Image (tube, coloured by chain):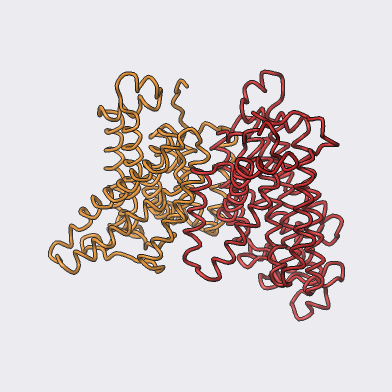
Amino acid sequence: MTTSAPTSGRTFFLRPQDMIGIAILAILLVVVLPLTLDNFRLQFVGKYLTYAFVALGLVLCWGYAGILSLGQGVFFGLGGYCMAMFLKLEASSVENTKIQTTPGIPDFMDWNQITELPLMWQPFNNLGLTIVAVILVPALFAFIVGFAMFKRRVGGVYFAIITQALAAILTILIVGQQGYTGGINGITDLRTLHGWDIRTDAAKTILYFVCVGLLIACILLAYYVKSSKLGRILVAMRDKEDRVRFSGYDVASFKVFVFCLAASLSAIGGAMFTLQVGFMSPSFVGIVPSIEMVIYTAVGGRLSILGAIYGTLLVNWAKTSFSESFPELWLFGLGGLFIAVVLIFPNGLAGLWQTYVAPRLGPLFGGSAKRAAAPAVAE
Amino acid sequence: MFSDYSLAELSSIFMMQGFAGLILFSVFVLMALGLAIIFGQMGVINMAHGEFMILGAYVTYFTSQFFLNYLPSLFGIYFFVAMILAFLAAGALGMATEWLMIRHLYKRPLDTLLATWGLSLILQQVYRSVFGPREVGVELPSWMMGSLPVTEVVEVQINGLFVMGLTIAITVAVALLMYKSSWGKQVRAVVQNRVMAGAVGINTEKVDRYTFGLGCGIAGVAGSAFTMIGSTGPTSGQLYIVDTFLVVVFGGAQSLLGTIASAFTISQAQSTMEFFLSGSMAKVLTLLGVVVILMLRPQGLFVIKVRR
């Protein structure tokens, strides 16, 4: 494995080329896109960026630690639903809902003959608790799943199938429990955050920048994890799990940790999604969105933190523009992308960049004189 | 939840739901058999399995149309012709897939999952573009319609019985093929030790290709049987894929007996609970039960010890 050893040019935990990469991404997101795109398109980019949080988590979890989770939509959804529950409660104040049989509860509960706020919803009256829940509820869920499975050394394909089943279960549950979750329509008609109207264009632009800020922070966190000793152990575990175990490391705990971290990252994305798009529904939880999130990461490059961000933006941009003009072609495109990214360029865009572009650009862009070969994808 | 019903009613309910569960069981077994061969024997995750099944269903539909228009006198037996055609079509597509895609990925099982998911998306769109987005249903021959009374309140449909009979026949055939024929011996030899199998003169690549083709062919037959009890649309296959994978994993991937036992357990649990709870809760509880059991016993119900 060619995780580059600490070089002399390394400050803090970032290599110079990482810093340049992050700076370029930041300039693109903060300056270039807001100046060149109209409000409508910028809101799209904001929506795509919320998926980038999931892709970021998958790079750590799948690319570095080798754990493919097909249930990241679950965590995206949990985060999104936590945020949506808070916003919904604020939108369902007593004066807003006085035509209902029971004023003060969300409208869909009223339609389902529920007369008081369920216990599950109580904590979401408070913004602080909601933010804690956005991060901790998915992490806790991931901890339970991960702990049960990794301690028993379930991994690889079995883990993927079981996480996929979890995505299916949660979707069916949300759709079935209409009175508590809003059912198939999800939680809609969200209006204000602490009295601040989130539906205006100005608010959406602010939320976009908040989203970019959070994303950059999460990218830095991911780089920190990657460059730490922990990151090395993750890679070692992926490549030769038994050796790491025989060296005395508790493999399962590391896996649980990275799975929980990926879950929390996804959940932050979900919460930002709810804020920017203004609703949350089970269609972002299930099997299909979860596996699409994997393809964002795969296209960007499963071993590249920044690559995953670009992959997410690119796939989503392609999806939007294809679905607008040739809706029937999009599934062919997406299906072909799955196959191509596996068969032809398993390291994604980042792999192409490192192999063909970076060597010509000099050391600052990652093309060191030795030309570190792109690390091969492990099984 | 049982107190509202008398004992006689309860036993009838259990029989009726048990029978409905048996039909679900048949579909599960037919789908899972192909998957168990591909996943259990080859370690390949075929997410496009549902689409191979739907291919079989479409072949059956078009065969029925053909017989209806050109050979109405033989309409009673069209199903048997359709079944063979479905097997051949799905099997051929499966072998082509293996040759073009899967054989490059044997060392990366998680990547087969992504690649076959891509294939499933493409196939769905092909079906939608070629056959149209609407669901189609076949006309049953007259001898398959109606139902047989078992007791005064319990009736069983003939098409359901037929699908069950078909399931038993195919299961027996697959078991014979895998455990009694020389080809089955080759397949199992390749699974247990690929290098040694090659060294003793087994053409492992060919075995792989035919194994994959067989698994897909059985999915095609499953699709044929599926038309007897439901209609077919471009995305019908995707509805079953997760359930089927759980069936295979729950049963223990390498064991045919395990696959059948787990299909039975899951389908019976689901259809019995469906009567007392809502359909969605029944499904949630069944899947959750399976997932929890798999967490406690990751190797599945039945284990065949294979030296790696």
Image location of residue A277, percent across then percent down: 71, 67
Q: Residue at x 54, y 37 (%)?
A: A158
Q: Residue furthest bottom?
A: A99
Q: Is residue A60 above or below residue A293?
A: above
Image location of residue A112, percent across then percent down: 66, 70
Q: Residue at x 62, y 53 (%)?
A: A170
Image location of residue B99, percent across then percent down: 36, 41
Q: Nearer the viewer, residue A175 or A153?
A: A153
Q: Nearer the viewer, residue A374 or A158?
A: A374
Left-right relation of B131 to A83: left
Image location of residue B231, percent across then percent down: 37, 63
Chain coloured orange: B
Chain coloured red: A
Q: Is residue A324 above or below residue A83?
A: below
The image quadrant of residue B142 is bottom left
Q: Is residue A344 above or below residue A202?
A: above
Left-right relation of B41 to B281: left
